[in-house]
Image: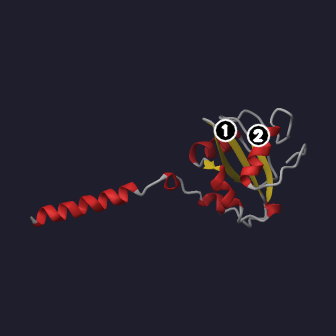
Amino acid sequence: MRKIGTTLLLLTTFCLFGCTSNEKEKYDYSLYSSYVGNMKGIEVYCWETDENWYSGVLPGTNRVKQIDEIVWIQDNLPCPLKTMKQILLDYPKNEIGLIVIVDVPPVSWDGRITDDNKESYAYVCEQLGIDFPDGQVY
């Protein structure tokens, strides 16, 4: 009888802890927070996959990012916009240098807001809690 009680307790514990895992635990976004205060600014890359928007952060605004850098964040740290909004709250506004919408996989980008991508930029900026600069280069 004691074995059955111990087994049930272990099974219950296993089930409770197994059922508490969720999507948030799938990725560790601390890398995105680690760039706060680096004095180089950040660029936020955003993309849509299966009708969901994701984002990632790359440090520095003084150079054009390579395609493999953006592919890496798309493949390894796709951050939902809602979560990215919380991460960006730690950044001073002047450190967010660029919001760029890219394809999956990225082909080319220049950060310009055009008639073709204006709605996407407005949506992304709204979700991230960033003022939308109508018609400007971000």
Residue 14 in picture, x, y percent from top left: 30, 59
Q: In front here: 121 or 100? A: 121
**What residue is pinned by disc 2?**
120
Q: Is residue 114 above or below residue 62?
A: above
Residue 10: quarter of image: bottom left
- The crowd level at tag 1 (other Cα within 10 Å; few <14, some 14-19, many 20+) is some
State how far apart marks 2 and 1 are (Cα): 9 Å
Type of colouring? secondary structure
Which quarter of the image is occupied by the N terminus?
A: bottom left
For residue 94, the mark is none
Residue type at the position of mark 2: Ser
Marks 2/1 in contact by CB < 8 Å: the verdict is yes
Furthest toward the left, the residue is 1
Q: Quadrant of residue 84?
A: bottom right
How many tags in the picture? Answer: 2
On the image, numbered disc 1 is attached to which residue?
48
Q: Secondary structure at mark 2?
A: helix
Residue beneath the point at 80% across and 50% down: 98
In this picture, residue 121 sits left or right of residue 69: right
